[in-house]
Amino acid sequence: MAKTTGSLFTHLTCVECGKNHLRNEWNTVCKDDSCKSILSAQYDFGSNKLSKEELKNRSSSLWRYKEFLPVFDENNIVTLGEGFSPILRLLNQRSYTEGKQLLLKDESNNPTGSFKARGLSLAVSKAKELGIDTFVIPTAGNAGGALAAYAARGGLKAHIFMPKLTPKAFKDEARLFGAEVTEIDGNISDCGKIANALAVENGWFDVSTLKEPYRLEGKKTMGYEIAEQLDWTVPDVIFYPTGGGTGIIGIWKAFNELEQLGWIGSKRPRMVAVQSESCNGIYTAFHQKESRSAYKDGGFTIANGLRVPKPYADKVILKVLQDSNGHSISVNDTDILTALRELAAHEGLLVAPEGAALWHAYKVLNQAGWIKEGETVLLLNTGSAYKYLENITNT
Ligand SMILES: *Cc1c(COP(=O)(O)O)cnc(C)c1O
Ligand SMILES: [Zn+2]
């Protein structure tokens, strides 16, 4: 028996050309061949009946916002309890945080140890609703683990393409979840080409970052949570480790939706995209005031999630940085490791290298006076360091 979620999802819109796409069909990117930009789920916020107060009685997972997510039948929800992660204050870094409120939203305790759980819970649930049973994904590690776990949970099949250089724990977990893992001598872009070809050949559903519209819906819930957990306010600044950019685009989308709901006002945080020096195309494009990024791969980085040579949604990421009066910082592996060790030894937080990069970036912008007295700053730590330990303790 179908049991409705009360979802207000109406259709998908192309962020570039505005072409509408149906909600009850398989969709990937814009169907206009000369466009192919990303699709963004739209909702009928005008007919919302849910109040902020009622939310307090909901489950401590991202599905507490189910009216604003795209799944219609509760039976199709594939969940492992993802989301509603804590926001912690940094306590023992006073020389850097004097006069500022420094917060860290900690995604490390999500299922499979990263915020990728959010996107894949949504993508797998919606795909199940549309009758899809086999997935393929190119991954730097965490997305593959998350897809494998949710596919196992939903009784579905997953094929995963991962660079050979990824730490062993990422491959092991995906195989334990029953996925077929293929190691590729190359980077995530090389994995993506193979995944895409096999998807076309075998009729598998390709859940590459932003080449289907629903992972974004999972990631946007971070924005809903930040506002709810800060009592319906937003921080002055958000630091985000940017690979494919789903989170930065999703959080921005969330704030616009919350304003349509009348739950927050028009204030927005300044968004900071933090990249690894290995792949800092967004950083370069931002500082050169370009609207697109160039392909850039400088090889290995301990922050595997940031080794994305060219984000598919580069244009959208750069627009968010611009519209928010944001910034972009590029961090090398030495500084990432120092930052990681500091947060571990002084805060008890074993954050992923991607998250550790934020702490270094914060110190740079704070030193430069870009962070002002009295401001609230949120670092979005995207994952746990446990799967990366072989690279961290060997360097
Ligand atoms: C994938 C990943 C990122 C990058 O996320 P995007 O939303 O693709 O920019 C950052 N940190 C970790 C731990 C990741 O797994
Ligand atoms: Zn389009």
Image (spheres, rainbow, N blue to C red):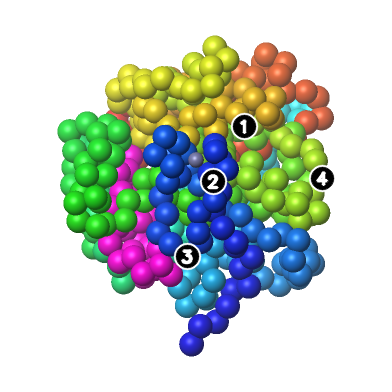
Name the residue tied to disc 4: 265
Which SS class for mark 2? loop
Which SS class for mark 4? loop
Q: Nearer the viewer, mark 3 or mark 4?
A: 3
Classify mark 1 as within 8 Å of ligand 1 or not, answering yes or no: no
Mark 1 residue type: Val
Q: Is residue 152 magenta?
A: yes
Using the rendered image of the protein, determine whether residue 168 is visible from the camera's viewpoint: no
Crowd around label 4: few <14 · some 14–19 · many ≥20 (10 Å): some
Classify mark 3 as within 8 Å of ligand 2 or not, answering yes or no: no
Which SS class for mark 3? loop
Where residue 116 appears, as percent x and y from the top left, is 44, 50
Using the rendered image of the protein, determine whether residue 127 is visible from the camera's viewpoint: yes
Where residue 346 appears, as percent x and y from the top left, is 57, 35
Name the residue tied to disc 3: 24
Name the residue tied to disc 2: 19
Q: Are marks 3 and 4 in contact (CB under 8 Å)?
A: no
Where residue 33 appears, as percent x and y from the top left, is 39, 39
Instruction: State the CA–CA distance, disc 1 to disc 4.
Output: 18 Å
Quadrant containing the C terminus is: top left
Is 98 positioned to the left or the right of 307 in the image?
A: right
Q: Is residue 361 magenta?
A: no
Q: Nearer the viewer, mark 3 or mark 2?
A: 2
Which one is nearer the viewer's eye here, 158 or 92? 158
Instruction: State the CA–CA distance, disc 2 to disc 4.
Output: 28 Å
Q: Are marks 1 and 2 in contact (CB under 8 Å)?
A: no
Taking the spot 74% from the left edge, 37% from the top edge, the residue there is: 268
Which one is nearer the viewer's eye here, 145 or 374? 145
Among the two numbered marks 3 and 4 on one chain, the one whose residue lies closer to the N terminus: 3
